[in-house]
Image (cartoon, rainbow, N blue to C red):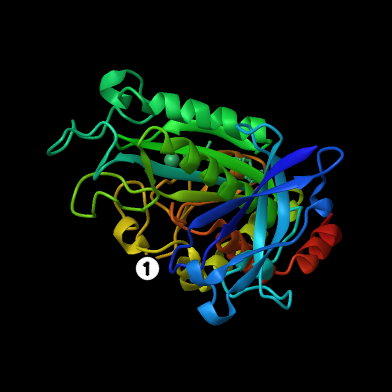
Amino acid sequence: MKFKLEYIWLDGYEPTPNLRSKTKIAEFASVPELEELPVWNFDGSSTRQAEGSSSDCLLQPVAVHPDPVRTNGLLVMCEVLLPDGTPHASNSRATIPDDPETWFGFEQEYFLYRGAAPLGFPAEGFPAPQGEYYTGVGFKNVGDVAREIVEQHLDLCLEAGIEVEGINAEVAKGQWEFQIFGKGSRRAADEVWIARYLLLRLCERYGVDVNFHPKPLGAEHDWNGSGMHCNFSTRHMREVGGEEYFAALMDAFDDHKDHHIAVYGPDNHLRLTGLHETAAIDEFTFGVANRGASIRVPWSFVRNGHRGYLEDRRPNSLGDPYRIAGRILQTIATVPVDELLAEETLAA
Ligand code: ADP
Ligand code: MN
Ligand code: MN
Ligand code: MN
């Protein structure tokens, strides 16, 4: 049987890579497993990943999902390799730490745009101020076609086997969110990229663009920016936790705050102003149920003996989820757990 394999990868544009894809037809007796998918290649000189004189880059399949809109179609997420098989400089996935016991939940916010303005904005000027749009219903709040798009996107993600956890209308008109959960940094981030891909591809036929900029309407207006809050929990945080470990973890996040901001998405200074449910970009703060903090500590976390997950609210909508999750794991790794575990066992 012939299959349509859509090889998907990230290009070499800075500071934000674009999604690219092309189709390979290949024959298999039945639906192929990841290991059966061949390495492929593309012209890196057209994606800012190579010089024209030596333009071949390799596509190494790393995740595969059914393609819900194509007969015998598969979505094949790839890493970009150099001809010698080593990771290309643009391949952030290859270099991040991973740990399937660390769970991530990304809340991807975005605007739907038609032409130069968010969907539902009048031809000139602005619609009614923010207030009723968040989780809103009705034509005046969500317009006519946005609901159809987000519903179809949800179905596409589910049919592709993406761990989508929910969707909601956001604070600004034309702004929406979907949430992706995954065990391990690579798995969660792969699925964010595939969910972005499915949304972009779906919107083509509506003449609608997805605007992932973190502050598309500018910092001078009273319109929210877009984030990609990153919720995370290690096995230790879920099963052991404790106030002492939490304090040490927050100290580490404070120590490394600039390293985090460096990979939390471009133009974040426009969004992390201290207004619109954000923290200031140059400060690290945390607080229980505080949506104006860098890290929000859910009530459930405190109630359960400082166990569970935390929400880093600083990553933005344009951020690369590989780098974001990787940095969080790097900072967590600076906090020793064995000694704390040992102390707790002694105390018990
Ligand atoms: P809010 O909008 O209130 O910040 P959402 O419901 O949009 O929260 O998103 C919560 C996110 O937290 C989801 O992406 C979910 O997958 C994630 N999450 C829930 N439990 C855990 C956990 N134990 N570890 C990591 N992420 C988690
Ligand atoms: Mn949310
Ligand atoms: Mn949100
Ligand atoms: Mn959130």
Question: For residue 79, which quarter of the picture?
Answer: bottom right
- Which type of secondary structure does the marked residue at label 1 adopt? loop
Which residue reaches farthest bottom?
A: 53
Residue 70, compared with residue 295, is above or below; it is above
Of 127 and 235, the residue lying toward us: 127
What residue is rendered at 33% in x and 48% in y?
225
Q: Neighbour class for label 1 at 10 Å: few (<14), some, many (≥20)?
A: few
Q: Position of residue 59 (x, y in %)?
A: 67, 62
> The N terminus appears in which quarter of the rendering?
top right
Residue 261, compared with residue 277, is above or below; it is below
What residue is rendered at 57% in x and 50% in y?
193
- Asked whether, in this view, residue 336 is left or right of residue 189, the answer is right
Q: Position of residue 127 (x, y in %)?
A: 18, 32
Q: Position of residue 346 (x, y in %)?
A: 85, 61
Q: Does the image show residue 267?
A: yes
What residue is rendered at 44% in x and 61% in y?
265
What residue is rendered at 43% in x and 68% in y?
15
Residue 77, compared with residue 93, is above or below; it is above
- Asked whether, in this view, residue 202 is left or right of residue 302, the answer is left
The residue singled out by tag 1 in the image is 282
Q: Amino acid at mark 1?
A: Asp
Of 49 and 107, the residue lying toward us: 49
> The C terminus appears in which quarter of the rendering?
bottom right
- Asked whether, in this view, residue 58 is left or right of residue 318, the answer is right
Q: Does the image show residue 241?
A: no
